[in-house]
Structure formats: C-alpha cells, structure tokens
Amino acid sequence: MSDSDDAALWHALHRLVVDYWAEVDENAGLGAHEFYLPDGVYIVGNSRFEGEEKIRAFYLRRGHGGVVTRHLISNLRTSREDARHARIAGLMSLYRADGMSPFQGARPPAMIADFDARCVLRDNGSWRFQSHELRPFIIGHDMPASITIKPQAL
C-alpha cells in the first residue's frame, strides 16, 4: 500500500479509526457496528464477523465481564483507490485488564496487530468501514475477546 500525500484523506480516515477505537474503549463498543457499512466485515485473525448484526452481537458479547481496554494505533498510512474508496493501514496495540482503573503493575499488551481497513465515503460525507482486518503478530496470555469469541456462536 502506498502512502497518500492527501492530508484531508489521512485526517478523515485517522478520525474514523480513532473514533471507532474510542467507542470500543469508552462505550464497550455498543455503537461500534455504526462505523461499518451494513454489509461490512470485521476480521481478527481467523475470526470473521460479517454484517452489521454479527458485528453488533460480537460487541454485545465482548462487553460482559468488566474488562477495561485501550486500543492504541500508530504508523498510519492511507491511500485513495477512487473518489469514494480508500484504505488505511497501521499498527494497533491492545491493552486490557480486569476491574477498574487505575491498575498497578505492568501488563504487556494483550495483542499487537497490523490492520488494514477498506473505507467507503457515503453520500452524507462520512467514511465507513467496508472491511477492517486485524492481523495479530503478538498475542499475550490475556487473550482478547476478538480471538476467543467465535462468530458461529453469535
């Protein structure tokens, strides 16, 4: 993927992915499905959540258990495919812990993953994920829900 010199595109897609992870961290992802097209796909490793209802069901199931998370993104790159289609790629690190913050003691990331998202510009000027794929390359002992919840169980 080549990086775009289009600062407005980088800003718009950066905002999409940052707002998405803030929704997941600050609101347990209850509105995360709204960041996808109705037929959007969320993929983490071998888990594939297809369509708005499966994505919503994943986040409803994930929200149980009192786990606090922070998803950090970096190394963002964007590219435009055409006027309404673009991609954003980068690195996502997931930190998670049981209970209430603040936590004492160092905990390693639960997962570090490359991500690649295909995005579509809607008629109202907002960007949405057509697909959002996380490719884990480090998974800690504290397995994230996106790895343990199986799509067929939803």
Image (cartoon, grey):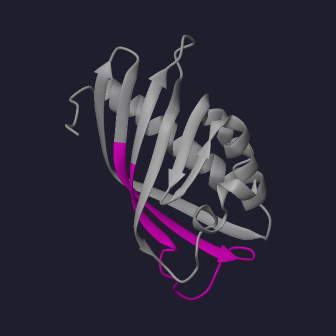
Q: Is residue 34 above or below residue 17?
A: above
For residue 102, side relative to residue 107 (left or right) = right
| Residue 41 found in image quarter | top right
Residue 78 in picture, x, y percent from top left? 30, 36
| Residue 19 found in image quarter | top right
Q: Is residue 61 above or below residue 20?
A: below
Residue extending furthest top?
123
Q: Is residue 83 above or below residue 85?
A: above
Work out whether residue 65 or residue 149 is closer to the camera in this orientation and state it. Answer: 149
* Residue at screen point 52% across, 50% down: 43
Residue 70 in picture, x, y percent from top left? 57, 62
Residue 118 in picture, x, y percent from top left? 42, 34
Residue extending furthest bottom?
105
Is residue 5 located in the magenta-colored stretch of the structure? no
Q: Number of callouts in the render?
A: 0
For residue 18, side relative to residue 89 (left or right) = right
* Residue at screen point 69% across, 49% down: 29
* Residue at screen point 68% across, 36% down: 52
Write down the region rendered in magenta: 89-115
For residue 137, side relative to residue 3 (left or right) = right
Q: Quadrant of the N terminus?
A: top left
* Residue at screen point 58% across, 75% down: 143
For residue 149, side relative to residue 107 (left or right) = right
Residue 56 in picture, x, y percent from top left? 73, 44
Work out whether residue 11 or residue 98 is closer to the camera in this orientation and state it. Answer: 98
Work out whether residue 62 or residue 53 is closer to the camera in this orientation and state it. Answer: 53
